[in-house]
Image (tube, rainbow, N blue to C red):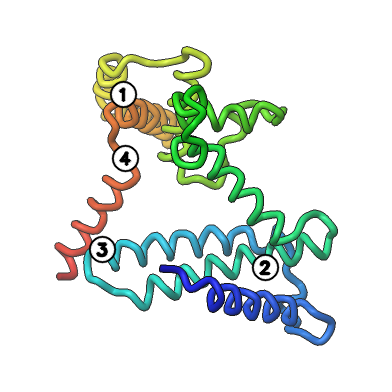
Amino acid sequence: MLNESKTLEALKKFILVCEELRSEHGCPWDKAQTHESLRMQLIEEAYEAADAMLNYQTKGEIDNLREELGDILLQVVLHSVIAEEEHIFTLEDVVNEITEKMIHRHPHVFNRDNQDENKKTWEELKAEEKSKDTTPLLHGIPKALPALLRSAKVQKKAAVNYHHKMDVEFSVSQIALLANQLEKVTSKEKKEKLMTSMLYHMTNVAWQENINLEECLMKNIDTVINSLEP
């Protein structure tokens, strides 16, 4: 069980460390950071944490996972400290917002007496939260996502919200047709267009068949590496 007192004490100490790093007499590098300058670092840290989770699952490595989750926490706190300096929001705001979101999206846990709320799906509850957001739906899908994952998310949301959906059979036939054309073209530009279309149709098949193409490709890459460097 969570030791609330020790956890809050540790978190408070860490926040003070981050604030000190950003202070007038703090670290020059940390003081110079902005949301934009830390953006790619956050992405890299997320990938490293995901990799540590795989190592924990396959090799039982605990220390690396703990370290990488700490690096993710550093990013969250640093961005919150910067935002507070800019008078935008605070870490308290961040925590309160995610707390309210989790409660709202789990009425079957936190609001058991309201049967109407309990019948709502995660996506319906999420849509309620986004109803005030004027950003077009597909434009809200993060551009920083890996291309295969982003493609699948775009196609899935387009199918659900705009009834724009390609049949799996059609995409399979297009992949075969494009592969045949790829053997015949010679220019780099045409090859790029054909290969891009093939990938788009492959992600369409993948999401409809509930296949994570990104993970599949990662596993295949690991298989190749292990076969060459056992």
Please name the amino acid that badge 2 sits on.
Answer: Leu
Dot 4 or dot 1, earlier in sequence: 1
Separation of residues labelled 4 and 3 (CA atoms): 18 Å
Q: Residue 83, percent across and down?
A: 77, 60
- Residue placed most toward the observer, 116 or 30: 116
Q: CA distance from mark 1 to mark 2?
A: 47 Å
**Residue at the spot of label 2:** 78
Tag 1, which secondary structure?
Answer: helix
Alpha carbons under labels 4 and 1: distance apart = 22 Å
Q: Are marks 4 and 1 in contact (CB under 8 Å)?
A: no
Instruction: Find disc 3 in the rendering and name its residue.
Output: 57
Q: Earlier in the sequence, mark 3 or mark 2?
A: 3
Q: Position of residue 172 (x, y in %)?
A: 26, 21
Residue 214 lies, with reference to residue 161, above or below; the image says below
Residue located farthest toward the front when viewing the structure as drawn: 113
Which numbered disc, 4 or 3, marks the residue that appears first in the sequence?
3
Residue that mark 4 sits on: 212
Tag 2: Cα neighbours inside 10 Å, few (<14), some, or many (≥20)?
A: many
Quarter of the image with the N terminus in it: bottom left
Indicate which label's residue lies in the foreground, 4 or 3.
3
- The kind of residue tagged 1 is Leu
Q: Earlier in the sequence, mark 1 or mark 2?
A: 2
> At which x and y percent is residue 183?
26, 29
Residues packed near mark 1 inside 10 Å, few (<14), some (14 to 19) or many (20 plus): some
